Image (spheres, rainbow, N blue to C red):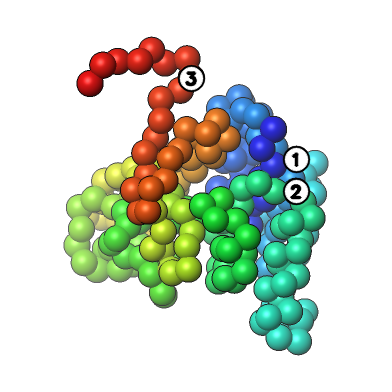
Amino acid sequence: MMKTAVLVSGGGTNLQAIIDAIRDGRITDTEISLVLSNNKHAYALERASKAGIPALSISPKDYGSREQFNQALLEAVQRSGAQLVVLAGFLCTIPPQMVEAYPNRIINIHPSLIPSFCGTGFYGLKVHEAALERGVRISGATVHFVDAGTDTGPILLQKAVEVRSSDTPKELQLRIMQQAEWKILPEAIQLIAHERVHIDGRCVTILPAADEAWQPS
């Protein structure tokens, strides 16, 4: 059973997608051992409580320095026994010591097709505003592993979503969540839980399931 910590700052719709996927059997051999938010008012904490999942708020404002917050964050995740850390709309920078403690065991969901509209400053509606301003016809979502950079880790899964000429940023955001984020984030967790992901540098290979027949190349 793979223990997973989910870090989130807001409403927790991606958290709910994970909870639902575990309940429905689309994610197996996995449990959420902790939901952690830097925002004590995040609705994600209520979602966790309703699902009977341990929930915790740790805010940078509660500590005298960023280093103290970073250490508290890492210790909370470690205490939960998490083997995988999922960033599901977590708006705090992941400290280097956490990346070092969980190499290739931290994944993030980003609301664009990386490398487009990603990196510092691209989060939430800002991503979709930039996409619409640029006039792209396709956007989507990406699940990637977290490294020392911002949205620079190896890409695990991507899913494209149509951009409509009439879209507002909020309409595009909702469509990408419904058609991409809520689908590929649970899929990524399932792949990792069943050891079907091989990483070689920046190249990610998805291995066949144990019950899939081998096909000659």
Q: Which mark is residue 86?
A: none
Q: Which residue is mark 3?
A: 210
Q: Going by the image, does 36 lie left or right of 86?
A: right
> Is residue 186 depicted above or below 95 in this figure?
above
- Mark 2 vs mark 1, foreground winner is 2
What secondary structure is marked by label 2? loop
Q: Amino acid at mark 1?
A: Ala
What secondary structure is marked by label 3? loop
Please give the name of the residue rendered at 58% of the width and 63% of the height, measured from the top-left corner.
100
Q: Which mark is residue 51?
A: 1
Measure the alpha-carbon separation of dots 3 and 2: 26 Å
Q: Earlier in the sequence, mark 1 or mark 3?
A: 1
| Cβ atoms under marks 1 and 3 closer than 8 Å | no
> Is residue 217 depicted above or below 194 in this figure?
above
Q: Amino acid at mark 3?
A: Ala
**Residue density around tag 2, few if under 14, some if 14–19, many if 20 or more, within 10 Å:** some
Q: Which residue is mark 2?
A: 81
